[in-house]
């Protein structure tokens, strides 16, 4: 069995940071439980969190839970190519279903691609998100965690 590396979608960190969030307790409990594994934060999620009103609080929180922002995999063409491939699949699905223009943005697919490819050989890639249905459909190779599911 390979070691697990868990990437975090920004919605998990946002819920953990906000005591008024409906998923706050579950997000904090999840981070407490999974802190024995490497916890990674895709670069796009890191930027999204720092764009909020309290970037220093975010940095302190990430340090407390030993969450490591990851930038290096964005140098890997395979991450961008996988994100583009899955985004193309999504856009095609939307068009065929006549659901209209894509509602997702490429960044969502970069998060999935980075989570899938970042850990490297010998590691089982995982992603924690409250939006697991989307990631299950387009990145089914990932182990998915929904902190709200317990």
Image: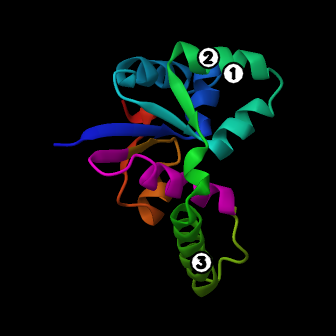
Q: Name the residue under label 2.
A: 61
Q: What stretch is highlighted in magenta?
A: 106-125
Mark 1 or mark 3, earlier in chain: 1
Q: Quadrant of the N terminus?
A: top left
As measured in the structure, the alpha-carbon distance from the residue carrying label 1 to the one carrying label 3 is 33 Å
93 displayed left or right of 36: right
Q: Residue at x 47, y 65 (%)?
A: 138
Q: Mark 3 points at which residue?
A: 88
Q: Residue 56 in the image: x percent, y percent?
A: 76, 17
Q: Name the residue under label 1.
A: 58
Whether residues under marks 1 and 2 lie with C-beta atoms below 8 angstroms apart, the answer is yes
Residue 20 appears in the figure: no
- Taking depth in this image into account, of 110 and 147 the one nearest to the observer is 110
Judged from the image, the secondary structure of the residue bearing numbered disc 1 is helix
Q: In which quarter of the image is residue 70?
A: top right
Judged from the image, the secondary structure of the residue bearing numbered disc 3 is helix
């Amino acid at each position: 069995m390979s070691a697990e590396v868990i990437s975090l979608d920004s919605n998990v960190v946002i819920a953990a940071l906000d005591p008024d969030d409906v998923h706050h307790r579950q997000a904090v409990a999840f981070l407490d439980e999974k802190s024995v594994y490497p916890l990674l934060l895709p670069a796009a999620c890191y930027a999204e969190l720092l764009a909020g009103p309290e970037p220093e609080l975010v940095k302190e929180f990430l340090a407390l839970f030993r969450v490591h922002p990851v930038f290096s995999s964005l140098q890997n063409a395979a991450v961008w190519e996988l994100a583009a491939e899955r985004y193309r699949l999504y856009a095609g699905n939307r068009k065929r279903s006549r659901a209209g223009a894509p509602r997702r943005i490429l960044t969502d697919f970069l998060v999935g691609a980075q989570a899938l490819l970042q850990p490297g050989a010998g590691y089982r890639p995982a992603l924690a998100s409250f939006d697991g249905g989307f990631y299950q459909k387009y990145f089914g190779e990932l182990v998915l965690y929904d902190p709200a599911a317990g």
